[in-house]
């Protein structure tokens, strides 16, 4: 079963009467366990594609099936439920809530599922341990370094046991060393069976996945399977 | 489904982020609720004070007042000048066969005059009545004695003076046996009233009380009464007494049509009722004025909430990305608004209580009013309830605005 299937997906932005085509009839299938990287020049539509796949935005045409369910007719709240239960996000700007602690940030998605404070903090602690930030759990996120922030964001993306994780330029705001560590971490997640979709314009990130989609002018220009995935070292270099 | 306790926590966290701003925002609500609390409490205290004074008249007293029943602010003054109650009416009312259930009939005249002793002059209220007035108003004599029934009949020029009158005219000297003058008419002082608190309709401290016969003839120069007080045997007997008085006076004044009565009847209850009506109207009016400040405060809350929603657009986008529904976001911001106003309400109730207490203290201490401090429970409940409603009313628009934001546009917001 395909985790994600889209058919002739279109997204046209209407900017004061001027139509801009961001996605122009994209067909795509993503299976469980894949590590898909999406590359392309800015304005190519790669972020738009990720936002629609992540149920943050709606297409203006075509069909989107998530776990074989057509999402076209889903209400805002039903899409929120899918994001809450099936999807994890990692953003370029981390998007942590600065006044909450690391623990509270990681546990936040579970709050919207109605899980008790105790249970969600317990779960969050497990993931904070996974990203090796145990000693920072009580810190406000504003006191962390960029790399630490992104690890908190990854822990948050994992806290709801998502079917798929979307990362939009996850290394974009980091130096190469921190970025390398994050990328290595994403590879480890993939090794454990997590499905990942990473949007990037950095080539070393693109080469870290198992499949690369090249997007130009709102179309998939090239869909490349990577036979032997490049391993990222801690200092950010490909082996 | 998000837990209500989490909505609560999120809202508290939201408003504690900007403590100064939150404080300034709720100030309008605090002031509004304080004003409402104070007005309601003071209204209640004032009512109690006045009604308490009225109750001094005794529940079985019937006041016969000359003139038409006042039905507006302008007609009230006319009753003072009316001279429809004559000596004959008083004598007839005293006859047992005319008003069988009357226990006592007390005449009452009053006017203002300058009293002098030696070189001292003091403006007093001269009250003329019978000896029964002492019982009627429960007057305590501090020095000397009250005049008696014979002195009333004999038109004796004797007087009982108020405490303040004694102070002004005699200082610390003993006034008993001395004579005070109203123009060239001399009255011998036989008693001094005990000092009493202010706030009654009649300030007995500044009064000189003498037999009505002497006051009518020698001070005021009138042959009518300003009031005739008929004390019924019991409260139950009041309706009968009132009926008998009306019948007698209409007969004496040749009136067939009750519409054309040249007198009217007041009882303690009817006076208290009209006073309550007046104080209630005043309280409602003042509360309404104070409520305007609440609306202003509410608009302030709305304004700040709108700013907050815009400032936190990215936060809203992120929360939605993580699975917050429109309802979750709406609840979060609405709770914040209600929280702010409710806190404002609580502080307002506290402020109102303190202010009322302070005013009651000042009124007692410095103005000599017997003003009791009343914590208005209804005022407190209303204050907090109203502040809740203000939060809901003025918070819903910003909260809806936040809830309707698209997740992706909010995340992109710079």
Image: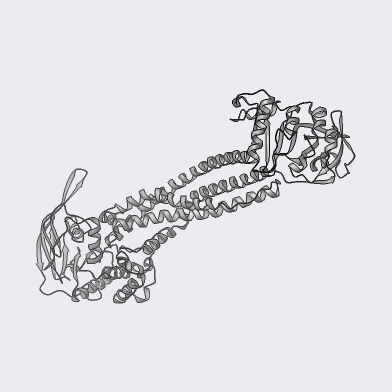
Tell which residue pokes out farthest to the right in this image. B177
The reply to whether residue A98 is visible in this rendering is no
Q: Residue at x 27, y 62 (%)?
A: B323
Look at the picture and state if B98 lies above or below A160.
above
Instruction: Decide if residue B262 is on the left or right side of residue B36.
Output: right
**Residue B28: % across, % down:** 49, 48
A130 or B377: nearer the viewer: B377
**Residue B236: % across, % down:** 64, 43
- Which quadrant would the C terminus of chain A be assigned to in this image? bottom left
- Which quadrant would the N terminus of chain A be assigned to in this image? bottom left
**Residue A17: % across, % down:** 19, 43
Instruction: Decide if residue B329 is on the left or right side of residue B95.
Output: left
Q: Residue at x 17, y 49 (%)?
A: A20
B296 or B34: nearer the viewer: B34
**Residue A130: % across, % down:** 29, 76
A6 or A90: nearer the viewer: A6
The reply to whether residue A14 is visible in this rendering is yes
Quarter of the figure with residue B132: top right
């Amino acid at each position: 079963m395909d985790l994600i299937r889209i058919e002739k997906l279109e997204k046209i932005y209407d900017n004061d009467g001027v139509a801009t085509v961001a996605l122009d009839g994209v067909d795509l299938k993503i299976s469980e366990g894949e590590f898909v990287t999406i590359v392309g020049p800015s304005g190519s539509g790669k972020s738009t594609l990720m936002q629609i796949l992540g149920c943050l935005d709606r297409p203006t045409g075509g069909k989107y099936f998530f776990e074989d369910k057509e999402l076209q007719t889903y209400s805002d709240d039903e899409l929120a439920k899918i994001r809450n239960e099936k999807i994890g996000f990692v953003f370029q700007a981390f998007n942590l809530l600065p006044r909450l602690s690391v623990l509270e940030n990681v546990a936040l998605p579970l709050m919207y599922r109605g899980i008790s404070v105790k249970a969600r903090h317990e779960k969050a602690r497990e993931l904070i341990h996974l990203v090796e930030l145990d000693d920072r759990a009580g810190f406000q996120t504003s006191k962390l370094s960029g790399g630490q922030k992104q690890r908190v964001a990854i822990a948050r993306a994992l806290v709801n046991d998502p079917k798929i994780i979307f990362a939009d330029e996850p290394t974009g705001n980091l130096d190469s060393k921190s970025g390398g560590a994050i990328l290595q971490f994403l590879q480890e997640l993939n090794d454990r069976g997590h499905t990942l979709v990473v949007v990037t314009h950095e080539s070393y990130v693109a080469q870290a996945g198992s499949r690369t989609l090249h997007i130009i002018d709102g179309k998939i220009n090239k869909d490349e399977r990577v036979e032997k995935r490049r391993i990222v070292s801690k200092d950010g270099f490909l082996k | 489904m998000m837990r209500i306790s989490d909505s609560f926590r999120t809202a508290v966290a939201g408003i504690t982020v900007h403590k100064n701003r939150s404080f300034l925002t709720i100030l309008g609500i605090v002031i509004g609720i304080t004003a409402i609390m104070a007005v309601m409490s003071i209204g209640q205290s004032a009512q109690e004070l006045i009604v308490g004074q009225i109750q001094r008249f005794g529940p079985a007293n019937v006041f016969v007042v000359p003139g038409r029943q006042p039905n507006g602010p302008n007609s009230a003054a006319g009753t003072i000048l009316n001279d429809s109650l004559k000596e004959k009416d008083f004598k007839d009312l005293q006859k047992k066969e005319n008003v069988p259930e009357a226990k006592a009939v007390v005449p009452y005249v009053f006017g203002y005059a300058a009293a002098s002793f030696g070189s001292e002059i003091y403006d007093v209220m001269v009250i003329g009545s019978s000896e029964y007035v002492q019982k009627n108003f429960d007057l305590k004599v501090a020095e000397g004695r009250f005049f008696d029934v014979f002195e009333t009949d004999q038109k004796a020029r004797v007087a009982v003076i108020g405490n303040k009158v004694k102070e002004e005219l005699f200082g610390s000297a003993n006034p008993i046996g001395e004579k005070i003058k109203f123009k060239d008419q001399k009255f011998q002082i036989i008693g001094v009233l005990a000092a009493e608190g202010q706030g009654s309709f009649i300030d007995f401290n500044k009064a000189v009380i003498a037999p009505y016969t002497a006051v009518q003839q020698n001070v005021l120069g009138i042959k009518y009464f300003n009031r005739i007080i008929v004390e019924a045997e019991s409260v139950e007997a009041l309706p009968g007494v009132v009926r008998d008085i009306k019948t007698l006076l209409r007969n004496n004044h040749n009136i067939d049509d009750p519409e054309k009565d040249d007198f009217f009847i007041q009882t303690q209850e009817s006076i208290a009722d009209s006073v309550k009506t007046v104080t209630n109207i005043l309280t409602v009016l003042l509360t309404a004025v104070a409520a305007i400040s609440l609306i202003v405060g509410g608009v302030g809350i709305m304004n700040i909430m709108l700013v907050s929603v815009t400032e936190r657009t990215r936060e809203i986008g992120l929360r939605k990305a993580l699975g917050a529904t429109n309802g979750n976001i709406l609840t979060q911001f609405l709770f914040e608004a209600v929280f702010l106003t409710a806190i404002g309400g609580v502080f307002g109730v506290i402020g109102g209580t303190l202010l009322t207490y302070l005013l009651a203290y000042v009124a007692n201490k410095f103005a000599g009013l017997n003003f009791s401090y009343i914590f208005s429970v209804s005022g407190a409940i209303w204050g907090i309830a109203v502040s809740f409603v203000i939060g809901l009313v003025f918070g819903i628009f910003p909260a809806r605005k936040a809830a309707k934001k698209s997740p992706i546009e909010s995340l992109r917001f710079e």
